[in-house]
Image (cartoon, rainbow, N blue to C red):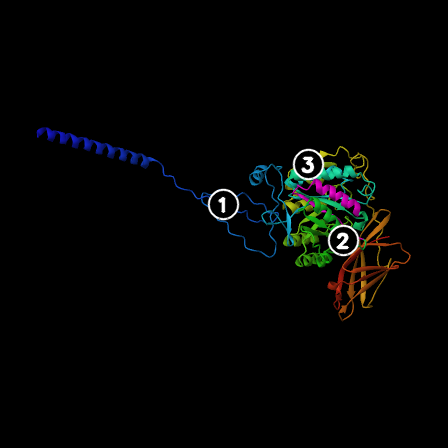
Amino acid sequence: MKKQKIKKRYFYAIILVFILLLVTKVGYEKLQRDMQPAVVPVATAAPAEPESISVPVATSEPEATTEPVVTPEPEPTLEPVTTVPPTVVPQETKEEIQGEEIMANALSPLHVEGTSIVNEQGEKVQLRGISTHGIAWFPQYINLDFFKQMHEEWNADVVRLAMYTAENGGYCTDGDKEATKQLIRDGVAYAEEAGMYVIVDWHILSDFNPHTNKAEAMKFFEEMSEEFADKTHVIYEICNEPNGGISWSEIKSYAEEVIGVIREKDADAIILVGTPNWSQMVDQAAKDPITDYENIMYTLHYYAGTHKESLRNTMVQAIKDGLPVFVSEYGICDASGNGALDYDQANKWVETMNSYGVSYVAWNISNKSESSAMFKAECNKISGFNEADLNPSGKWLIEMLTGEATSTLPTHEGVENPNESADRSTPTTMDNTPAPQPSPYTAPVGVTEADLNITTNNNALTVTLKTTDTWSSNGGNYYNCNITLTNTSGNDITGWEIYIDLSGKDFKLDTGWNGDYVSEGNVLKITNKDYNGTVSAGGSVGDIGFIIKM
């Protein structure tokens, strides 16, 4: 009996020891767990969409935050149109998105939506930049260092390569086709590396009608569009300035053929189409736009010293009518590319274009002896430009693009043009010979009412004619004339006509604005537009302008 009690005690003791060991093990594991740091799931916020900004305002990178950030959707705006700068996508970012190797400076593809240019994210984009002069005459400016300066220091995000077609040295006359195409290729490559879009410009001018060299145009654009089909930064401009009375229907038929050639190779690039009367009559294109193709825009050109409120109103109305307008050339002097600068009108144009998100490209990159040239005639540089190298128009342009005085921009030693001729007013071509270009600027004597027999359809209307500019070129004298009609009666006059008798004078009308112009024998007849047909009692109608060659 005693032995049984001892056995029971041993049994209970063993059970107790086992329980103590088990409790100790569980407690130790719990203690270990309690001593580990807590792992809290962290919610990861999706990257916030970039906020739209108005050009040329620059924004800093958003500050880092430890909490998810919710970015509110931007409220819709009417005017001014909010645009974003074109986006340069770094190579590594592109590789993550597309899984393939793309050049470091690949630019976001652009397309036309409504009247605006938009990027891949659907944000409206406004391009602002500078056009070369004729690249066959001024090839020295097609270089990478200069393109980088345009983009990095002057905020230009597009450069236009102007390839003249019919002038001396033009692509379709006696120019070197292969050398000129190589300049285009170089310009396209340099623009991409610099982070800019580029416009390949078929620069018709003295050939007037784009159909004149249509066969050459189709060959050129077929070749270029095949080469640049995978480039997201190339824009094609297929007829710079149709003029000489060419109608919109004729331009449209040309454009549809050339666009078809481009679309066989490049399905998506934006294509710019010129409009009648030196690319001013966008209203005609608005009434009958090209409908068989997408990503088409229509060009308007202006020179602030000549083209003022009336042409701005034409542009605005065309946009309101649904036409996507691109100002692929403008200047702040008069329509000759020379003469006095009109800063007031220049600023009004920029304000209007910014309000409607219209892209614009200034004329011109050269050291030619004319007021529209960016650089002084004595400037021999090809890159590294400073304030002292700039003409007044160049200073205005850079200050407008950057929002800063040119005196505050970086300074450079500059690179001289090794091919510059002894006469710095005469640039050289690719083969180091003097470049063909229009005759040097001279000022013939202006014309006045006394030189011209001017009458109207109403004796109560008096005419004041002023010559705003004169120049000599291509064997003739050009006169930029401006007329003001004054109503001397006590009643409104609706409907006016002006008759300019040029008997005994060998003349040719180059262009006209704020009126309909018809040459009837020796008489130039000007008839009012709908918007300026009424001259109020004691009032006047002005800016009725034209350029004639005599």
In front of the other: 349 or 187: 187
Quarter-of-image position of residue 218: top right
Distance CA(mark 1)–CA(mark 3): 38 Å
Q: Amino acid at mark 2?
A: Ser
Instruction: Tell me the SS state at disc 1.
Output: loop
Which mark is in front, 1 or 3? 1
Residue at the farthest bottom position: 491
Residue 158 is situated, as x and y percent measured from the top left of the image, at 67, 44
Magenta segment includes 248: no
Query: In screen coordinates, is 169 left or right of 230?
Result: right
Q: Is residue 298 visible?
A: yes
Residue numbers of the magenta segment: 214-243
> Eyeballing the image, is 117 above or below 430?
below
Packing grade of label 1 (10 A; few <14, some 14-19, many >=20) is: few
Quarter-of-image position of residue 170: top right
Q: Amino acid at mark 1?
A: Ala
Magenta segment includes 236: yes
Which mark is in front, 2 or 1? 2
The residue lying at 71 percent from left, 43 percent from top is 225
Packing grade of label 2 (10 A; few <14, some 14-19, many >=20) is: few
Instruction: Tell me the SS state at disc 2.
Output: helix
Residue 252 is situated, as x and y percent measured from the top left of the image, at 75, 54
Q: Amino acid at mark 3?
A: Leu
Instruction: Give the labeled residue for mark 3.
Output: 144
Instruction: Give the labeled residue for mark 1.
Output: 46
Q: Say whether disc 2 or disc 1 marks the residue closer to the N-terminus.
A: 1
Instruction: Give the labeled residue for mark 2.
Output: 253
Packing grade of label 3 (10 A; few <14, some 14-19, many >=20) is: some
